[in-house]
Amino acid sequence: MTYIWLLFSFRGRINRARYLVVQLALLTFWLLWLKFLFQFSQQWTTLLVDWVVTIAMIWINAATTAKRLHDRNRSGWWAVAVFVLNRLCYVYYGLFFGSYFGVDISIAMELLLVMLAVALSLLATWAFIELVFLIGTDGSNRFGPDPLARVPTGAPANSGSDQNDVPAFLVHRAGALPASSRQPD
C-alpha cells in the first residue's frame, strides 16, 4: 500500500486503525496550520496557499472516509453526507454560541436550535460509531479484499477443537493459537 493511494484514492478499503491514524494526522496538521495562519495572516500569499491546503485536506478526509465506508460495505458517497453533517454541526454551534453570548432570539428559535442540536448530535454520534468503532465486513466485498486478511503461509489449517471453543468469527479475526498454547490431545 502506498501513501498516494491511502491519501488520495477513493478506491479500495482501509481498516479502523489506518483511518484513525490519517484522521488524527489531519487534525494535528490542521491545528498547526491554524497557528501558522494566525501568525502570518497579513500576507496576501497565504490566501492562495490556504485554499490549496484546505482543498487537499478535504480531499484526503473524503478519500479515507470513503475507503473506510467501503470497508463497512457502504457506498463511498456516504462520505458526502458525513462531510455535510460535520459542516452543519459547525454552523449550528456557531449559531448556538452566538445566541448564548448576547444575540437576542425568540423562544421558538431557541426551541428549534435545541431540537437541531439533538438531531445533529445523534447523527454525528452514529457517523462516529460507524467509522471508528464498527469492524469492516469479513472477507472480500464489492469494494475489494479485506484489509485485515492474512496472507496464506502454507501452514496446515487447525481444526476447530484446537481453538478451545472460541467462536469462529473471533478465531478468523485473531488467527490460530500459537503451538505453545495449544492443549495436548
Image (tube, rainbow, N blue to C red):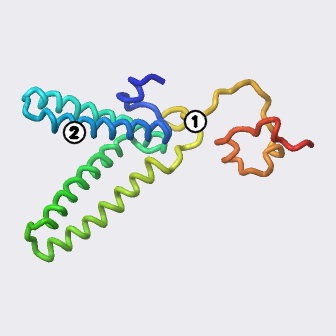
Farthest right residue in view: 185
Is residue 119 visible in this depiction of the protein?
Answer: yes
What residue appears at the point 50 percent right and 38 percent down from the top-left corner? 15
Q: For residue 105, what is the image quadrant? A: bottom left
Q: Is residue 151 above or below residue 68?
A: above
SS class of the residue under badge 2?
A: helix
**Residue 181 as seen in the image, left or right of residue 85:** right
Disc on res. 148: 1
The residue indicated by pointer 2 is: 34
The answer to whether one can see residue 58 in this image is no
- For the C terminus, the image quarter is top right
The number of callouts visible is 2
Return the x and y of residue 4 as percentages of the image width and height: 38, 23
Question: Residue 77 appears in which quarter of the rendering?
Answer: top left
Tell me if label 2 and label 1 are in contact, CB under 8 Å. Answer: no
Q: Is residue 1 left or right of residue 156?
A: left
Above or below for 128 versus 17: below
